Image: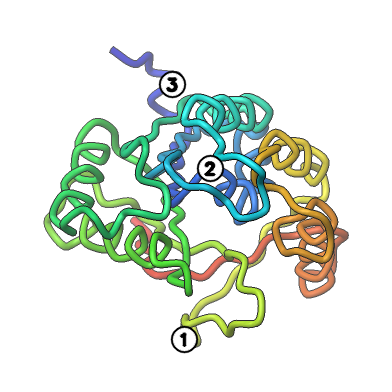
Amino acid sequence: MASIRESSRKKVLVIAPHGDDEVLGCGGMVARAGAEGALVTIIIMAAGGVHNYHLAVEASLDQRLEEIHAASKILGVCGTRVLFPGLEIHLEALPMLHLVSALDEVLSEQAYDECYIPEPSHNLDHTLTHQAALGAFRLGSNNTPSLIATYEGTRPGWQSPMGAGGDFLVNISATIDVKLAALSAYETQIREYPHPTSIEASKRLAALRGMEAGVDYAERFRILRLVRV
């Protein structure tokens, strides 16, 4: 049973298609939330089972899991789980019902105050994760968070499919180094600049969002649902 002190702490859930998306999209916010006392849980939908074309050999599932847990340790999260090992870039092999049901189970275990999910994108796993999360957050579902928002992904050459909405920016100037250190843990995923999954590109995007917010570094989110109780 959780202590009274623990139960009063803000609880944050991040749902990511693959290991590295959680860092690229909201690693700075995650590190900041943890430093401010929040309990952050990261759910990775799929890991392993794909041969990235920039690698000479396929990264093993064990290697990908090691990267995920190393990055989570750097960010200071309280828990990380992979729902579908071996299905990275293959979530379309599963019926949507399976994806939603897996997230239903996550939400039934714990009530969260905030949840961050990926934007839909040209990467089908991102779109399926986004859709499955919306399904899990349907009206009447278990423990719907008060705040549901999307985080940015990498969209080289493609416009975001998200329409106009309520954007908000989080100052991550104090945690940008933690974000980049966590991203460095994904040795099989990071690329050389100017690739969008490079360390330098992630830092430059944070600097751009920081300029929009009037701070050194920031991350941008889009509100899907906000209930103030």
**Quadrant of res 105:** top left
Mark 3 or mark 2: whose residue is earlier in sequence: 3
**Quadrant of res 160:** bottom right
User: Of circles 3 and 2, which is in front?
Assistant: 2
| Mark 3, residue position | 6
User: Of circles 1 and 2, which is in front?
Assistant: 2
Callout 3: helix, strand or loop?
helix
What residue type is disc 2 on?
A: Gly
Location of the C terminus (image quadrant): bottom left
User: Which residue sits at x=77%, y=55%?
Assistant: 198
Nearest the eye: 67 or 71:
67
Callout 2: helix, strand or loop?
loop
| Mark 1, residue position | 163
What residue type is disc 3 on?
A: Glu
Q: Are marks 3 and 2 in contact (CB under 8 Å)?
A: no
| Residue 123 pos. (x, y %) | 46, 67
Locate residue 129 relative to residue 54 in the image: left or right: left
Nearest the eye: 137 or 189:
189
| Residue 182 pos. (x, y %) | 70, 36
User: Which residue sits at x=47%, y=72%?
Assistant: 121
Mark 1 or mark 2: whose residue is earlier in sequence: 2
| Mark 2, residue position | 19
Crowding at mark 1 (Cα within 10 Å: few <14, some 14-19, many 20+): few
User: Which residue sits at x=41%, y=55%?
Assistant: 89
Crowding at mark 2 (Cα within 10 Å: few <14, some 14-19, many 20+): many
| Residue 200 pos. (x, y %) | 85, 56
Q: What number is the disc on residue 229?
A: none
Q: Does 106 sit above or below residue 228?
A: above
User: Which residue sits at x=46%, y=26%?
Assistant: 79
Mark 3 or mark 1: whose residue is earlier in sequence: 3
Locate residue 88 relative to residue 216 in the image: left or right: left
